[in-house]
């Protein structure tokens, strides 16, 4: 489906001739109107405004409806995935679910709470982190003004105009250890003394020297981080987590080591990396070499490291400001929601085994995310900082 097809579909909706599936498609892609690309340039501005209001009203009516939800077959949904693949290029908030149940099965309605509007909305995470210096001093980075934050034995720490932290050291600088940590609901970017750029996701940390004075450049991480490593063939760069060691010379890659995820994932975008099991884990040593577009999976209960093709966009979506899911279950989605919105997740009535495809901006309040989930027949309720997922 190209832009002409989209415009034809919008015209049919305006004239009232769109089919039920076409109307549902437009409802699911309501955020098309917020896309940066000028998809609707051929339409009159007044018509765009009126159409937007009409579609939004349809969304609200669909979410408020209480009739039984029909679980669509995977084949029906794939028709719309073809169209979704085009719209996703425009960073539209989308969500489609793919049922694992038989195509003719209808979800039964139980005595579950109805979905209520989110009264006390929850804001998304922000750029926030704490810096722990070698002497134990703790500095809240989001509270600091731009400029010099600290000077440690020849190494200077500065906060740049865009808010990220930069390390610089002279030739005589002594290496002391610092740690930057993000809370749930936080993210941060820093530049190490060698010029390596690091982005930390929520609930993550990196421990590193203020100056690189050894034969290897070593850092330790928890949680998730994206690296753009400065090239230095004479000094290999190592990223060490609880279960693995990643060795590179100069490359771009993402590392996900959250303890609540089933495996540690390393996704390579550029260059090459060697992934090894951390020998301190007392398991059999395993090593794999990755090329761009590949991802390694290290399951904590297994000695081997598995390599597979990667969706690199999905792996770094968090760093680029959105969630992206490709055939993942609701638990995978809600783990990311929990970390970014700093909320607790509770499941009632069992856990759905449906899988989902979608893309949602991380700048949305939690109500925006839950609205999109509701379009995919996922009922939720919010109690304080707890999100309750209700399985019918």
Image (spheres, rainbow, N blue to C red):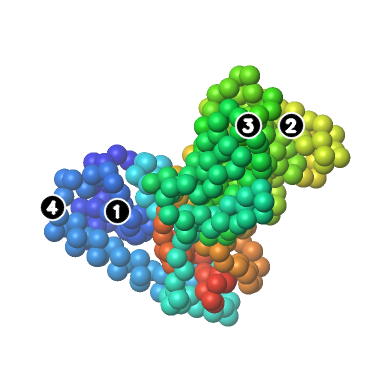
Residue identifier under label 3:
212
Q: Can residue 368 be seen in this view?
A: yes
Query: Residue 246 location in percent, x, y?
Result: 68, 32
| SS for dot 3 | loop
Query: Residue 331 location in percent, x, y?
Result: 61, 58
Residue identifier under label 4:
44
For the residue pair 223 and 2, the one nearer the viewer reads as: 223
Disc 4 and disc 2: Cα gap in Å? 57 Å
Please tell me which residue is depicted at 30% across the width and 49% down the height of the picture: 35
Contact check, label 1 and label 2, Cβ < 8 Å: no
For the residue pair 334 and 392, the one nearer the viewer reads as: 334
Residue identifier under label 1:
34
Residue identifier under label 2:
276
For the residue pair 196 and 299, the one nearer the viewer reads as: 196
Dot 1: few (<14), some (14–19), or many (≥20) neighbours within 10 Å?
few
Q: Which of marks 3 and 4 is nearer the N terminus?
A: 4
Dot 3: few (<14), some (14–19), or many (≥20) neighbours within 10 Å?
many
Disc 3 and disc 4: Cα gap in Å? 59 Å
Query: Residue 238 location in percent, x, y?
Result: 67, 32
Mark 1 vs mark 3: in front: 3
Contact check, label 4 and label 2, Cβ < 8 Å: no
Quadrant (top left/top right/bottom left/bottom right) for the C terminus:
bottom right
Q: Which of marks 3 and 2 is nearer the N terminus?
A: 3
Disc 4 and disc 1: Cα gap in Å? 16 Å
């Amino acid at each position: 489906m190209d832009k002409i097809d989209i415009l034809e579909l919008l015209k049919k909706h305006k004239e009232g001739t769109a089919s039920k599936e076409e109307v549902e498609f437009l409802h699911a892609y309501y955020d098309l109107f917020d896309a940066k690309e000028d998809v609707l340039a051929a339409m009159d501005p007044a018509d765009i405004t009126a159409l937007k209001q009409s579609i939004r009203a349809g969304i609200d009516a669909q979410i408020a409806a209480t009739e039984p939800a029909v679980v669509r077959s995977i084949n029906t949904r794939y028709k719309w995935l073809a169209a979704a693949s085009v719209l996703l290029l425009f960073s539209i908030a989308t969500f489609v679910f793919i049922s694992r149940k038989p195509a003719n099965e209808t979800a039964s309605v139980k005595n579950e709470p109805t979905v209520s509007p989110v009264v006390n909305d929850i804001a998304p995470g922000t750029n926030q982190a704490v810096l722990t210096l070698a002497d134990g001093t703790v500095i809240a980075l989001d509270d600091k003004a731009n400029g010099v934050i600290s000077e440690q034995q020849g190494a200077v720490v500065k906060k740049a105009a865009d808010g990220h932290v930069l390390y610089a050291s002279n030739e005589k600088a002594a290496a002391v250890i610092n740690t930057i940590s993000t809370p749930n609901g936080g993210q941060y970017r820093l530049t190490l003394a060698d010029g390596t750029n690091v982005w930390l996701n929520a609930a993550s940390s990196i421990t590193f020297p203020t100056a690189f004075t050894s034969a290897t450049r070593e850092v330790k991480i928890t949680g998730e981080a994206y690296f753009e490593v400065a090239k230095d063939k004479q000094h290999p760069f190592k990223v060490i987590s609880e279960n693995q060691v990643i060795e590179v010379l100069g490359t771009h890659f993402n590392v996900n080591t959250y303890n609540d995820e089933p495996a540690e994932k390393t996704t390579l975008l550029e260059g090459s990396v060697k992934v090894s099991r951390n020998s301190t884990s007392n398991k059999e040593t395993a090593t794999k070499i990755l090329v761009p577009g590949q991802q390694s999976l290290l399951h904590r209960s297994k000695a081997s490291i598995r390599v597979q093709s990667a969706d690199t966009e999905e792996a770094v979506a968090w760093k680029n400001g959105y969630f992206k899911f490709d055939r993942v279950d609701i638990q995978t989605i809600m783990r990311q929601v929990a970390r970014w919105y700093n909320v607790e997740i509770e499941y009632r009535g069992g856990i759905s085994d449906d899988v989902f495809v979608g893309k949602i901006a991380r700048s949305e309040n939690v109500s925006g995310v839950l609205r999109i989930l509701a379009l995919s027949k996922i009922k939720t309720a919010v109690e304080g900082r707890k999100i309750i997922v209700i399985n019918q």
